[in-house]
Image (cartoon, grey):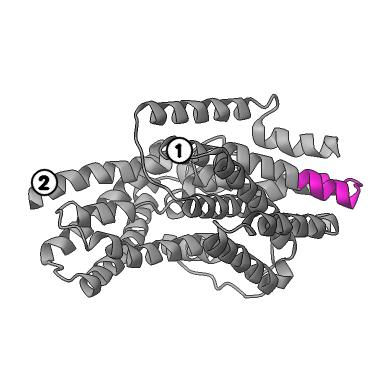
């Protein structure tokens, strides 16, 4: 069991666990810096528990779904192993990676800017552990997706309605125990992602088309489509928070937030074969980068249009200047994203979760926020 755990954990943390030490150091720096800055935000325990649970479950699911992780797992499952030892070693390695490298950073930020006590910290850790175990258990029951949906809804309801009730901790603990029992009887092969063979015959084209490649890429990566759907939902919800503000910065800030569409901005970083082909073939700066820029622009402008429509319905007052601003932000975000991908692609990532949560993803939204301040000043 220890040997299997080390095989997975060293792949994620490094041969000498150097990545873990680096992450802990970053957490300490972030916590100390924010705490000294005396930034205080009132965060209720309900928000803390729900944020930790959803974030941890999402990262854990993304880690289990990583194609790179599946390739590494294939080499191990070819060897004889004990079913129970393999499952718990694998889940423990993925869970430790999720909690120590992702959730720990989130907790460092949340706990540094809010007041907290020991009970709330322990409850947050319990919610994170529950999220790891539940995500792994549901992942092993992929064929019974409706059971996972009901389970996730029950956990959400417990956090939403019972975070301050005496039965909250027992319910979350019971969820952890149930997930543990399911994993105890799970099959190790249920965590291996097999690529489904498409039965559809793909028609050939006399001329190449980068747009067809983008479309097929999104269809084959359902999580990318889900992220786009989440951005559209955010575009619908943001006006509810902005309509009470009369600042000219509000609309440009909304466009800047909606530029945080990570998956479509990392196509070269996520596919080494594509990057090698694009850089090897001649005239690819024009052949690939120009359609890629238009593709990101189309994704951005769609979210911005949804945002403006929602803002018009909820608050009204959308002007032609706002529409022009939306086009400007969508195009600038697309250009900056393509330039980053071409000149500074992300290297050395272990799982797709690393790629999605790489600090580089915040560069373009940060630039857009600065532009939002400039545009807001001009519109004032």
Residue 307 visible in this rendered orientation of the protein: yes
Q: Position of residue 271 (x, y in %)?
A: 54, 48
Check residue 338 for magenta coloring: no
Q: 210 above or below 38?
A: below
The residues bearing labels 1 and 2 have C-alpha atoms spaced at a distance of 30 Å
Residue pointed to by mark 2? 377
Dividing the picture into quarters, in which one does residue 323 lie? Answer: bottom left
**Of label 1 and label 2, which has the lower sequence position?**
1
Q: Quadrant of the N terminus?
A: top right
Q: Nearer the viewer, residue 67 or 43?
A: 43
Name the residue rendered at 62%, 75% in the picture. 200
Q: Residues within 10 Å of mark 1 (few under 14, many from 20)?
A: some
Residue pointed to by mark 1? 109
Q: 252 above or below 146?
A: above
Which SS class for mark 2? helix
Q: Is residue 377 left or right of residue 80?
A: left
**Magenta-tinted stretch:** 75-90
Name the residue rendered at 58%, 50% in the picture. 56
Q: Residues within 10 Å of mark 2 (few under 14, many from 20)?
A: few
Q: Nearer the viewer, residue 356 or 32?
A: 32
From the image, state whether disc 1 or disc 2 is nearer to you.
1
Q: Is residue 259 left or right of residue 28?
A: left
Which SS class for mark 1? helix
Name the residue rendered at 49%, 69% in the picture. 205
Q: 359 above or below 288?
A: above
Q: Position of residue 131 (x, y in %)?
A: 63, 53
């Amino acid at each position: 069991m220890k040997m299997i755990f080390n095989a997975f954990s060293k792949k994620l943390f490094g041969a000498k666990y150097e990545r873990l030490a680096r992450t802990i150091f970053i957490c300490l720096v972030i916590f100390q810096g924010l705490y000294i800055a005396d930034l205080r935000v009132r965060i209720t325990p309900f928000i803390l528990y729900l944020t930790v649970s959803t974030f941890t479950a999402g990262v854990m699911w993304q880690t289990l779904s990583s194609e790179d992780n599946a390739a590494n797992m294939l080499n191990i499952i070819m060897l004889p192993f004990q079913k129970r030892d393999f499952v718990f070693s694998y889940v423990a390695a993925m869970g430790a990676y999720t909690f120590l490298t992702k959730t720990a950073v989130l907790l460092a930020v949340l706990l540094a800017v809010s007041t907290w006590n020991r009970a709330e910290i322990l409850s947050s850790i319990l919610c994170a552990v529950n999220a790891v175990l539940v995500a792994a258990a549901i992942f092993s029951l992929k064929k019974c997706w409706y059971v996972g949906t009901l389970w996730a809804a029950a956990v959400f309801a417990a956090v939403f309605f019972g975070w301050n009730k005496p039965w909250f901790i027992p319910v979350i603990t019971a969820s952890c125990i149930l997930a543990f029992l399911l994993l105890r009887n799970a099959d190790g092969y249920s965590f291996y992602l097999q690529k489904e063979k498409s039965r559809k015959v793909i028609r050939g084209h006399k001329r190449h088309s980068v747009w067809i490649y983008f479309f097929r890429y999104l269809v084959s990566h359902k999580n990318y489509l889900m992220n786009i759907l989440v951005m559209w939902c955010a575009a619908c919800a943001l006006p509810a928070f902005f309509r009470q503000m009369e600042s000219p910065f509000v609309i440009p800030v909304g466009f800047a937030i909606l530029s945080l569409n990570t998956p479509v901005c990392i196509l070269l970083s996520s596919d080494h074969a594509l990057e090698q082909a694009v850089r090897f073939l001649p005239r690819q700066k024009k052949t690939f980068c120009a359609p890629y820029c238009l593709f990101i622009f189309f994704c951005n402008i769609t979210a911005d249009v949804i945002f403006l429509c929602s803002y018009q319905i909820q608050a009204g007052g959308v002007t032609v200047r706002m529409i022009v601003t939306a086009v400007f932000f969508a195009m600038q975000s697309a250009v900056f994203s393509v330039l980053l991908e071409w000149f500074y692609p992300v290297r050395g990532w272990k799982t797709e979760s690393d790629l999605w949560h790489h600090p580089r993803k915040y560069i373009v939204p940060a630039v857009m926020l600065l532009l939002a301040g400039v545009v807001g000043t001009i519109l004032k």
